[in-house]
Every structure is written in C-alpha cells, then in structure tokens.
Amino acid sequence: MAAKTKKFKTEVQHLLDLVVHSLYSNKDIFLRELIANAADAVDKARFEALSNQDIAAEWAVRLQVDKDAKTLTITDNGIGMTEEEVVKNIGTIAQSGTKAFMKAIEEQGDKAADIPELIGQFGVGFYSSFMVADKVELVTKRAGSDAPAIRWTSDGKSSYSIEEATKDTHGTEVKLYFNETAEAYLEDWKIKEIVKKYSDFIEYPIILPSITTNEDKTTTVEDVTINSQKAIWLRQASEITEEDHKSFFSHISHHGGEPLKHIQLAAEGTTEFKALLYIPEKVPFNMFMPETQKKGLQLYVRRVFITDECEQLIPDYLRFVKGVVDSSDLPLNVSREILQENPLLTKIQKNVVRKVLSELKKMQDKEPETYAKFFKEFGKVLKEGMHTDYANQEKLQKLAMYETMNGEAGKLISLAEYVQAMPEAQKDIYYISGDSREQLENSPLLEYFKSKSFDVVFMTDPIDEWVVQSMQQYDKKNLKPIGKGELDLDEESKKESEKVIKKATDKHKNLVAFLQSELDANVKEVRFSSRLTESACCLVADEHDAGAHMERIFKAMNQEMPVSKRILELNPSHPLVEALQGCYTADAKDPKLASYAGLLYDQALLTEGSQITDPLKFSRQVAELMVASLQKDSKK
Ligand code: ADP
C-alpha cells in the first residue's frame, strides 16, 4: 500500500490549532493522556486474551527516550488498531465530543489555560501530543487479526498520512518528535515526576529504561518500573491520599474535574467485592447526552479488567457515580452476555445503591453545604429514582431538596425540614410546579398560603412533575398541588369561606353565567373561591386533570397531550367583581363586557406563566383601557 495523505476535517483542524496554541497551559498532561490510552488498549487486549490464546504478552507500557533525535516513544502491547480503526479513532474525533469541546472553549473565552483540563474531559486526548511535538508517528498492529500494521504520521496541521508498516507484535507505538519548547520531557526525572503524579495507579508496569555508565566506561541498560501499580481500590482507606483519589478519579471518569466525595466499599459474605466510587464535583458536559456517555461502573474480576461500562452495577438515576467494582466471585472469562442477567451483579448493585444512598444521607446530615452543592449538580438525576426505584423511594424522598416560597432564592430544604416548620393548623404538604422560581413567586395561587403563613414547595425541575405522580405522601402527609381542585381548608375556615362564596355566587349569578358563556371555549367553569386575597382571578386545574405545567412540558417535548379546560376562579372580595357587576346590571349587552371577560382570562394565563393566544388583541384591549382611564382622569 502506498502512503495516502488525508486531510483532517475542518473541525479537527480548528481543534488542533487551539491545542497547539494553548501556549501557557499545563503541557504535562500529554503524557497522562497517552499512557491512559496505552493502558486502556492493554486492558482491552487482556480481556480478549481470555478467549484468544494468540493474544499474549507481558503486559506493559514502555517509554523510550532518544535524546539525540529528541523523541519520546510510548509503546504498549495492547489491542492495537486496524487501518479502519486508525482512521476512525485518530483521523476524526467523535463528532459529539468535538462540538461540545469547541463550545466549552468558546464559553471560556480566551482563558486558554484551562484547555488541557478540557482535553481530558472531551475524549480528544491523543491530540494533546501536538502541544509538545511538531510531528507524531503512530505504528500499530491489531491483536488477533491478520490485518497489516499501519503507520500514521502527522504534523498536526492540516493532514495526516497513512501507510502499511512492519511490526511483529500487537500493540501501538506513539513517537513524539518534540518541538523546542518541550525538550524538558527528554529528562528522566521529568518523565518520572509526571508518571508519579498522574499514572501511578495504572495497573501495568510503566517501564523507563535506565542507563548507567560503568567504571570501565561501558553502559548498562536496565528496565525500571516507575509506577507503583497498586490497584487503588484494593488499598486500605488510610493508605490512599487525596492526591491519589484525584488522579484515579480523573483516570476513570475521563474528566478533568475533581471528586466531591469518595466511597469505599468492601463486601464480605455471600457476595464478595470491593468498590471505590466517586461522586464528581460537577456535572460532566455529557450528563444529558446519553449517547456520548460511558454508562455504568468499571468491572474487574480479581484485578483483571473486564469492562468499563458495566451498566448492571448501578441504576440509571445514579449514573453520575463513577468508579470501580472488583468482584471475587465472577469467573474471569465472563462474557458480556453473561453479564447481562447475572444475579451476582444484581446483588452487587443493591449493595452499591444502599451504600451510595447512605453516604449521601450522611453528607446531607453532617455536611449540609457539600450536600447542597451536590444536589444542585445532580439532584435532577437523583430524583428520577423516586419514580423508578420504588424500593428506595423513601430514602430518596428524604434526599430530595427543594426551594420553597418562604425560603430565599437558591436555598434548598428537604421535605423533613418543611414538615418540621409546618404550623399546627397545616396538615398537608403543598407544592406548586413551574419553570422557575421567578415565575412561581408571582403566582396568585400563593396568596392564600401567604395569608396563612403556610410554606409552599417550589417544584421547578421538569422531572418533578413526573416524580410527584408516584409520591402521594411523605411522612404520612399528603402532597397537594395548590393549583388543582378545590382548596381544602380547616373546618373553621371552611365554614367561613363557604358563607362568603355562597353569598358572592348568589349575588353575581348572572354575571358568572355570562362570563362562563363568553369563555366557554377555554374554561370549564367560572366560580368564586377563597384562594385569592389580592388578585382578581386565577386558573386552576380540575382535580384529575394534568395542570398547566404538565401541559407546557408536553408541548416543549412536541408531544400530543389532550389539553383540558380549566377552572377560572374569582376573588369575591376584589373590587373588579363589583365593578363588572355594575356594568352588567346597567347594560347586559354592553360590548365592553365581552372584551373584559377575555382580558380576565388572558390575565390569569399571564400570571401563571402560560402564553396567551392572541397577544395583539390583548395589547389593543389594554391600550383602550388606558385611554379610557386617562380621558376620565382629565375630565375630573
Ligand atoms: P479517548 O482516549 O478519550 O477516546 P483519544 O483522542 O485519546 O480519546 O483517543 C481516541 C481513540 O483512539 C481511543 O478511544 C482509542 O480507540 C484509540 N487509541 C488511542 N490510543 C490508542 C492506543 N495506544 N492503542 C489502541 N487504540 C488507541
């Protein structure tokens, strides 16, 4: 095969340009990325070797410096790549990764210093070699395949070349031709320092040959393993430093951030396994892009890597947890099919869930600030569990946090705290759902609760609306939406309010009937209620209807949802009611009345954050009202 030259996609070129020009940033990470790739490749080869005897080696990653040629070569005896794989993995970058990476960079503006961190997060690690090298040569041979070895060469500018090569053993060699700013990386001490810092826990020996000059001037070359190789999850908790956790976390999460919490778990008895889990500090960019995410935890069987996406180990709603499970009970040659429905994994998962939830509870009780930070990042995801993991619903209800009407913006409280603060007269837990605190704060539905000094839970995540469906009660108290059905009051207030409502209903019978017929297309019923103390009117859903927020969510997802008509409630003590009555009594055919009925309805829609159907008409009507009112003023 003759050498072929291929152009990088524009996006890749743009990316390379950014990487190369991130001049002042931490360039050391190129070695971390290349060693991580090498170790991943060895993981994969070792797994395939379990079922293919042709693949065998003394697993290792070797580093080789040539001071004269100013090169560093990173060699692994891992899985290697075919030509197709080279083009796919190295020549192009996963689309989603690149786009998200570019976006993150743009958002950072010119804070180029953070680019190396981003490189790790977005799975474009190989390209970081162009920060230090003006030419990179990769020679690779796929394990367990007859495909020829391939040489890939590039200067990281606009193109790369690819050709057949000779290589006897499987694996990959990456040779970096350092540019003049990177000559420090030719020094053993520098390489050792970086390896210690970032790659110490890598399970395979990272070998750097050491050359000593003997007395007789001959030289001896000796292989020296420069990492400690100890699987961190098998160590005693007291032996693991914060630094160890940080670097291990960044290794397994492919993510530059830091862990907020680590959780170590050693189960003995019927299922034996060890686990080291991390809750990240920040949501990774792809949390809500499931297709770009590695799912599940890493699974090892007696220190042998099996897979890095074992979904059976952790439920979806804990997908932010990253880490390793090492089982002593599974067979080494376990296939992916066997993993699919393995009762042992189900047991491990149960254990893992129990431990994670109890650690979160501990954090909530003992480190409320850390917990609040956690919840702001991952609360949305965690809350899914209330809907999907019935067995743990109670625990999850305790972990859920919300803003409330009486709390400051941004302050989250648990339902337990809410219940504790409830005044004697309050029996139920009240909530309202909507898009944001700002929108909910203005809702007229809150007026009654304010007047009673009852607090109201604000449910502002789209997921809340789903979750609350399967959560009728907390701590034996009913969860009641305040925008639905009749307002339920204590006995005394009830009598009082029934009296007021009856009086208003009798007095304004004709007016109400008129409004009802005017608004018939949109409104199921017009009625008086005690819900409002300041505003003139509001819309509520009938007991079993979905409610405005749910309808908006469906609309946003482009889903059909039967829109149910709602109830327009009037405030019997609002002067507007008397004024309308006056107008109606004077002339029931006054055209103003129909126009005001429409305005009333539009107002109610606007205050709850819904859209009105005809904004033009609305603004015309408001303008007319203003003119009329101003003319009246000037006549005075
Ligand atoms: P990431 O490792 O985050 O996926 P990289 O840009 O570092 O991103 O690498 C892209 C892909 O190239 C890897 O996912 C892997 O499939 C392949 N690759 C890189 N280095 C090696 C290697 N040493 N051996 C085999 N495959 C490799």
Image (cartoon, helix red, strand yellow):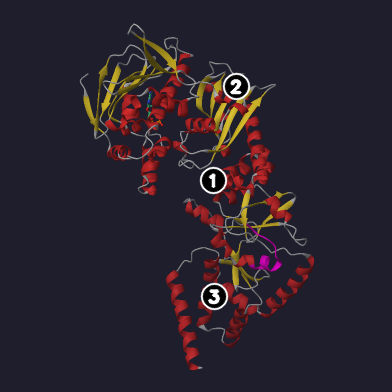
Does dot 2 land on a helix, a strand or a loop? strand
Q: What stretch is highlighted in magenta?
A: 447-457
Kindly identify which residue carries mark 2: 327
The residue at the point 44 percent across, 69 percent down is 615
* SS label for mark 1: helix
Kindly report the distance in space between the C-alpha atoms of the residues bearing marks 1 and 2.
30 Å
Residue 219 place in picture, x, y as percent: 34, 9
Is disc 3 surrounded by few (<14), some (14 to 19) or many (20+) residues within 10 Å?
A: some
* Amino acid on which the number 3 mark rests in the picture: Ala
Within-10-Å neighbours for mark 2: few <14, some 14–19, many 20+? many
**Which residue is label 3 attached to?**
597
- Which amino acid, mark 1? Glu
The residue sitting at 62% across, 25% down in the picture is: 236
Residue 33 position, x and y percent, is: 40, 29
Whether residue 628 is situated above or below residue 358 in the rendered picture: below
User: Which numbered disc flags the more N-terminal residue, 3 or 1?
Assistant: 1
Which residue is nearer to you in this view: 533 or 107?
Answer: 107
Of the pair 308 and 220, the residue shown nearer to us: 220
Q: Which of 216 and 328 is in front in this view?
A: 216
Query: Which circle marks residue 377 in the picture?
Result: 1
* Label 3 near ligand 1 (CB < 8 Å): no
Please indicate, yes or no, whether residue 141 appears anywhere in the rendered image.
yes
Membership of 39 in magenta stretch: no
Q: Nearer the viewer, mark 3 or mark 1?
A: 1
